[in-house]
């Protein structure tokens, strides 16, 4: 079985109770759709899942974040493929969100076209089809519902 490990990051602005989403073109979809910051874990040296979440935030929306909570682990399986995604809640500690330059994106096989802050009310008006996947839609719904866990529920340990 082919297993890929991912990290997902919901970046929030606690002052305005908003979430930052990216609008991204995904190969399997017709047009750009809303997504959270997310990416691969395990293909960038000895970084931890925490480091991967922080790195992905820097790469995709040009901000330095502090992880504040865990948001659970999603496991998806399809025939001989499985995807495990560790999800985090984070806040910006440095920088303003912006789309990374296209040459940098292309080197990472990304196609992010827009970054935008949404209130819970605004995001509730989006349909499930406007999100890049059912997994991301569910993650956003859990954020709206206020689900979160202590960051310590995840531990990176040696084999």
Image (spheres, helix red, strand yellow):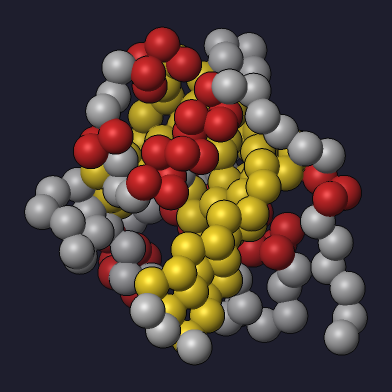
Residue 110 or residue 144, whichever sits in front: 144
The reply, left or right, for residue 151 in relation to residue 61 is right
Percent x, y for residue 20?
Answer: 47, 32
Assign the C terminus to one quadrant of the image.
bottom right
Percent x, y for residue 60?
Answer: 45, 53
Residue 149 or residue 80, whichever sits in front: 80
Q: Give the image quarter of residue 103.
A: bottom left
Q: Give the image quarter of residue 17.
A: top right
The reply, left or right, for residue 58 in relation to residue 90 is left
The reply, left or right, for residue 55 in relation to residue 113 is right
How many numbered callouts? 0
In the figure, 109 relative to 9: above or below? below
User: Is residue 132 in view from this perspective?
Assistant: yes
The residue located at (64%, 54%) in the rendering is 73
In the figure, 103 relative to 23: above or below? below
User: Is residue 98 in view from this perspective?
Assistant: no
Residue 85 or residue 58, whichever sits in front: 85
Residue 131 or residue 138, whichever sits in front: 138
Q: Give the image quarter of residue 33.
A: top left
The residue located at (71%, 33%) in the rendering is 148
Instruction: Spot the residue most to the left.
Output: 30
In the figure, 1 relative to 40: above or below? below
Percent x, y for residue 57?
Answer: 55, 50
Instruction: Spot the residue most to the front.
Output: 79
Percent x, y for residue 66?
Answer: 73, 42
The residue located at (37%, 79%) in the rendering is 79
In the figure, 60 relative to 143: above or below? below
């Amino acid at each position: 079985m082919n297993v890929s490990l991912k990290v997902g990051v919901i970046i929030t602005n606690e002052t305005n109770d908003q979430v930052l989403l990216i609008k991204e073109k995904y190969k399997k979809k017709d047009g750009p759709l809303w997504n959270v910051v997310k990416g691969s874990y395990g293909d960038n040296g000895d970084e931890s899942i925490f480091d991967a979440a922080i790195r992905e935030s820097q790469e995709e929306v040009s901000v330095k974040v502090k992880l504040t909570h865990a948001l659970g682990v999603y496991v998806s399986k399809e025939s001989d493929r499985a995807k495990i995604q560790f999800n985090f809640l984070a806040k910006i500690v440095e920088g303003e969100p912006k789309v990374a330059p296209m040459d940098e994106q292309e080197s990472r096989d990304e196609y992010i076209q827009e970054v935008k802050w949404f209130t819970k009310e605004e995001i509730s008006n989006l349909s499930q089809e406007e999100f890049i996947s059912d997994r991301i839609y569910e993650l956003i719904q859990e954020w709206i519902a206020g689900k979160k866990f202590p960051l310590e529920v995840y531990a990176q340990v040696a084999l």
